[in-house]
Image: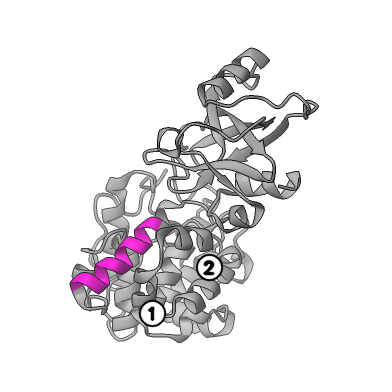
């Protein structure tokens, strides 16, 4: 593959690129609420929500968060479970936990005012180069170029960059070129335009090359390499995990527990969990788990069918089986030993849960 740029792009001015983007943007961009504010808090909120999330999915979450927590002080003062509950269904829950921590950091260390420069913004938890550049340019007009998936794609195709965008070392090449291209007099508009151009015009699978204003200058189009650029090595195959949930029930209550750290869905609530290396869980093994939890089975209940659900994450697949277990009496084991506590249906609805658990509850009528 021909590489236009190697270890670093040459320092050559390309004013046509910014001019083309700024001419395209006013006629094609989407009208989104975070584009009508210079408030660094609201800009930050939108960027955190839109990480690894499509605009259509993220928009209602942004509207909910911005109305529920209209200021960084309001978000910082919220209970962690409450924040996770509002985030429910969006996935990548570490974003919500980091977001809450960052809000508290801004209040405690910066007097409730976001840092006013790119370098200072990088000191905030969960704020990386992309988010810092977005806030710095959109709120403070600092000429720092954003670099997200859309920008990688646009730059790779138009300028013929063949560096693997999945390799961290490649970022320097793309960042250097993007910083060279951004106009000092309109950094916010440029950053919005290049991301929008990648989202709407220079799309991953079916870019609109026929009506592209940069068709004549585009390296990929001119060399028939639109589908080959950008270069991105394949991620490792996702592993499969087998979760056997014991839905322990007694009277009108169901037992749930809060998930601990160092695993998926940290801080969210689910049922008693027994993980195995198989989709099957024999009756004796299930009874052994119930016994270990201190439970005693009700004898007047018919066995209920097992519910099977699959949930696919970015790095793993969860094959879940839900086993309904009716108890003759409440669990005698103290919650601090098992983490399990009884909840009524309204209480369960208020708990932050993964989409897997939410789907099960919705379908089971709990």
Residue occupying image coordinates x 62% and y 42%: 254
Q: Is residue 350 above or below residue 232?
A: below
Predominant SS of the magenta segment = helix
- Figure quadrant of residue 89: bottom right
User: Which residue, given by chain and number where applicable, does mark 1 sit on?
Assistant: 71
- Give the percent coordinates (x, y) of residue 159: 39, 60
User: Which residue, given by chain and number where applicable, does mark 2 sit on?
Assistant: 215
Q: Which residues are magenta?
A: 97-109
Q: Is residue 227 above or below residue 119?
A: above
Observer able to see residue 14:
no
Marks 1 and 2 sit apart, C-alpha to C-alpha, by 43 Å
- Give the percent coordinates (x, y) of residue 291: 56, 20
64 left or right of 156 in image: right
Q: Quadrant of the N terminus?
A: top left
Q: Nearer the viewer, residue 61 or 244?
A: 244
113 left or right of 262 in image: left
Q: Earlier in the sequence, mark 1 or mark 2?
A: 1
Q: Nearer the viewer, residue 309 or 22?
A: 309
Q: Is residue 348 above or below residue 213?
A: above
SS class of the residue under badge 2? loop
32 left or right of 138 in image: right
Residue occupying image coordinates x 47% and y 86%: 36
Q: Nearer the viewer, residue 365 or 356?
A: 365
89 left or right of 152 in image: right
């Amino acid at each position: 593959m021909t590489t236009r740029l190697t270890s670093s792009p040459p320092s050559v001015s390309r004013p046509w690129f910014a001019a083309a983007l700024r001419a395209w943007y006013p006629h094609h961009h989407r009208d989104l609420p975070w584009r009508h504010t210079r408030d660094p808090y609201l800009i930050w909120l939108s960027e955190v929500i839109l990480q690894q999330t499509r605009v259509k999915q993220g928009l209602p979450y942004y509207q909910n968060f911005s109305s529920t927590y209209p200021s960084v002080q309001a978000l910082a003062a919220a209970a962690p479970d409450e924040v996770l509950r509002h985030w429910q269904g969006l996935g990548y829950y570490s974003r919500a936990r980091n977001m809450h921590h960052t809000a508290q950091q801004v209040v405690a260390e910066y007097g409730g005012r976001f840092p006013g420069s790119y370098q200072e913004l990088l000191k905030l938890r969960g704020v990386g180069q992309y988010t810092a550049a977005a806030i710095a340019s959109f709120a403070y007009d600092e000429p720092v170029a954003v670099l997200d998936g859309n920008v990688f794609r646009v730059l790779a195709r138009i300028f013929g960059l063949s560096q693997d965008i999945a390799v961290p070392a490649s970022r320097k090449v793309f960042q250097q070129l993007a910083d060279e291209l951004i106009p000092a007099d309109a950094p916010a508009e440029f950053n919005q335009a290049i991301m929008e151009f990648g989202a709407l015009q220079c799309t991953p699978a079916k870019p609109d090359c026929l009506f592209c204003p940069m068709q004549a200058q585009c390296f990929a189009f001119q060399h028939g390499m639109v589908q080959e650029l950008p270069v991105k090595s394949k991620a490792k195959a996702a592993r499969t995990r087998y979760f056997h949930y014991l839905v322990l029930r007694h009277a009108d209550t169901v037992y749930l527990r809060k998930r601990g750290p160092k695993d998926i869905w940290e801080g969210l609530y689910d049922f008693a969990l027994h993980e195995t290396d198989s989709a099957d869980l024999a009756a004796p093994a299930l009874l052994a788990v119930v016994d270990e939890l201190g439970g005693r089975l009700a004898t007047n209940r018919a066995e209920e069918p097992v519910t099977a659900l699959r949930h696919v994450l970015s790095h793993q697949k969860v094959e879940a089986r839900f086993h309904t277990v009716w108890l003759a009496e409440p669990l005698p084991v103290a919650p601090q030993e098992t983490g399990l506590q009884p909840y009524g249906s309204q209480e369960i609805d208020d708990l932050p849960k993964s989409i897997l658990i939410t789907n099960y509850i919705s379908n089971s009528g709990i």
